[in-house]
Image: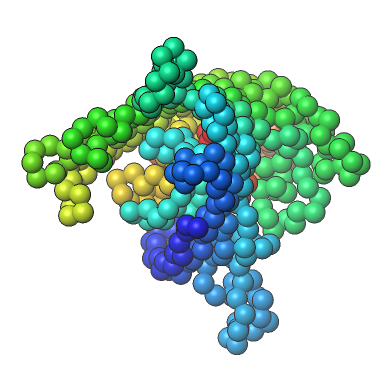
Amino acid sequence: MHGYYRARYNWIGNVPLPPVAGQFATGQANYGQMRLRIDPEITYGPNPDLPIARLRFTVDGFDNVVFGDNARVFSTPLFAVDQSATTVDGFDLKETLKLERAWIEFLVPIGQIRVGRMESQWGVGLLTHAGNGLADWGDFLRGETFDRILFATRPITLARAIATGDSRQTPLIFAFVYDRLSQDPVVDSTISVANGAATDPQFRPFYSTFDTRYTAPFAYLTNLDRRTSEIVGVLAWFDEESGTSEDDELFVGLYTVYRWQRSTESRITIPDLAVRLQHTVGDKGRAFTLEGEFFAILGHSGGLAFTGGCPPAPCNRGTAHLYNVLGRIGIKDPGQWDFRVEGGFASGDDNILFNTRPHDAWFNTNVKVGLLMYQVALYSLSWNRLARAQRAGARRERERLQLEVPLSAVPVRDHIGARGARHVLGRLGAQARPAPLRSRRSPSAGSRRRASSAGRLTSPFVRGLGKT
């Protein structure tokens, strides 16, 4: 049994607020939040570190729940004696104790197989981060979870064991992964509007035939062209005996994702290269550390609402060229002190609206770039720039219309028509020019389906396709 209980009190300045009368504003937030996480497991076999079989679970209680009654559980807040389960994203949990993950791992003669709903972690965590444990800076508010079948083996060990009978462990690792991301992205009629993205018209699947899930047994499972899947190939060199200290290690690996969906003509490829090194220097036990990761999202999709042309579906094809890199270098005296310098780059976009060639990459919200609240600062800057661009665009459009015809004589909608009105709105939205560096959503994984008002400024392409 493993786990932790976390309680935090936070103060955040310059928080972006919803627009009022076309004006964007910011405010200050201070609040308490908590999480209880339990990671029980059941093992079978003589070696608890590498058992023959292991059943693992992740259970979260009060997952990122804010202190207090924030849903009027008690009619008069002044006399509240019962508390709500409202998260930092502003959603009320249906259950305060939730089984997040459950999967089984078992050994076979040529490797290990894992099956179930499990965590996903690779490298620094730029592309996929499990959100486990306690962070050095800030908190992990979410984590990647996939319905996955995984097979892993050590090819050199396997070949040598077959040829010579020597089964000693070698550093080369190969893994093959299949993930089912969705079977049919229809809307569950039992989900309330308060749950956000699932029922928000702006986030519904534009290409879906059914507005809500059909209740006949197995009917929604027949829409095979709408299911989304991915395969992942992993090849890594993980040497845990690369130096003189037991903590020294060398890890270099390539994690390649191929994701597809037939109904939207989506084909996405994501190569991800990660490296991690710790090497002890001198007699004092001080160690040099190096860590980094780079990934690119390449491909095309017709399931992106911001490319236009939908509904009906598919949408206009969007072609992705997204890049993200992060590096850390440092030196430390284990147990005494740790000095580290880090930096990163994420490709940005001048136009995140009505764009068929997005470059809008992000930093995973669990990766604290520069050890700061980068995402909050970026969201605030994006909101402010969007507001200024929209005001400037609206002013230019009014001036253009006034030159063509007096607004007092002919209503704007009659002058340009319903289709033209939508085009004007499109041009106004397309004026937004956010910061060149982008960060990611997540809302949550919590959930990943939960989209906050600030998070919606980040590219839906990235939010839909960036995590593996």
- 4 or 145, nearer to the observer: 4
Locate residue 356, reporting x and y percent: 57, 24
Locate residue 166, reporting x and y percent: 39, 20
In which quadrant of the rendered image does the C terminus lie?
top right
Residue in the picture at 58% in, 86% down = 78
Locate residue 71: give its quadrant: bottom right
**71 vs 304: above or below:** below
Residue at the extreme right: 216
Locate residue 173, reporting x and y percent: 43, 25
Locate residue 167, reporting x and y percent: 41, 24
Can residue 118 be seen here?
no
Can residue 59 be seen here?
yes
- 455 or 91, nearer to the observer: 91
Residue at the extreme top: 163
Q: How many marks?
A: 0
Residue in the picture at 59% in, 24% down = 231
Residue at the extreme bottom: 79
Left or right: 435 in relation to 248? right
Residue in the picture at 45% in, 23% down = 154
Residue in the picture at 48% in, 54% down = 141
Left or right: 56 in relation to 417? left
- 334 or 185, nearer to the observer: 334
**314 vs 131: above or below:** above
Left or right: 174 in relation to 79? left
Figure coloring = rainbow
**286 vs 67: above or below:** above
Left or right: 95 in relation to 396? right
